[in-house]
Image: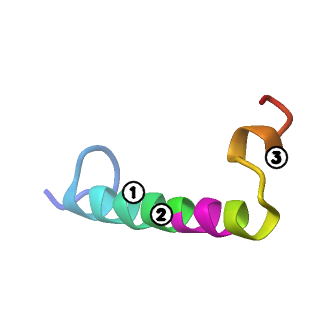
Amino acid sequence: MDTKFGFSSFAETWNGRLAMMGFIIGLGTELLTGQGILSQIGIG
């Protein structure tokens, strides 16, 4: 059964892609602003 929910190859592929994009966006924002991610959201 080819499902689009749960631990399927489709879900894991997209989860990995979105995680990589989030990491790159966070790193780029940190480099542009000079602040860490935690200080940008008011925690650090």
Asked whether, in this view, residue 13 is left or right of residue 23, the answer is left
Q: Earlier in the sequence, mark 3 or mark 2?
A: 2
Q: Is residue 14 left or right of residue 43?
A: left
Q: Earlier in the sequence, mark 1 or mark 3?
A: 1
Identify the residue shown where x is 71% and y is 47%: 36
What is the crowding at mark 2: few (fewer than 14 residues within 10 Å), some, or many (at least 20)?
few
| Residue at the spot 20% in from the left edge and 60% down from the top edge | 9
Numbered circles on residues, count? 3
The label on residue 18 is 2
* Residue farthest along the top direction in this orientation: 43
Alpha-carbon neighbours of circle 1 within 10 Å: few (<14), some, or many (≥20)? few
Q: Residue furthest right?
A: 42
What is the CA distance from the residue labelled 1 to the residue labelled 3? 24 Å
Q: Which secondary structure dominates the residues rendered in magenta?
A: helix
Which quadrant holds the C terminus?
top right
In the rendered image, residue 4 lying in the magenta stretch gets the answer no
From the top left corner, tell me how far across and down residue 31 is, in percent.
Answer: 68, 66
Query: Looking at the image, is 33 positioned above or below residue 8?
Result: below
- On the image, numbered disc 1 is attached to which residue? 15
Q: Residue furthest left?
A: 1
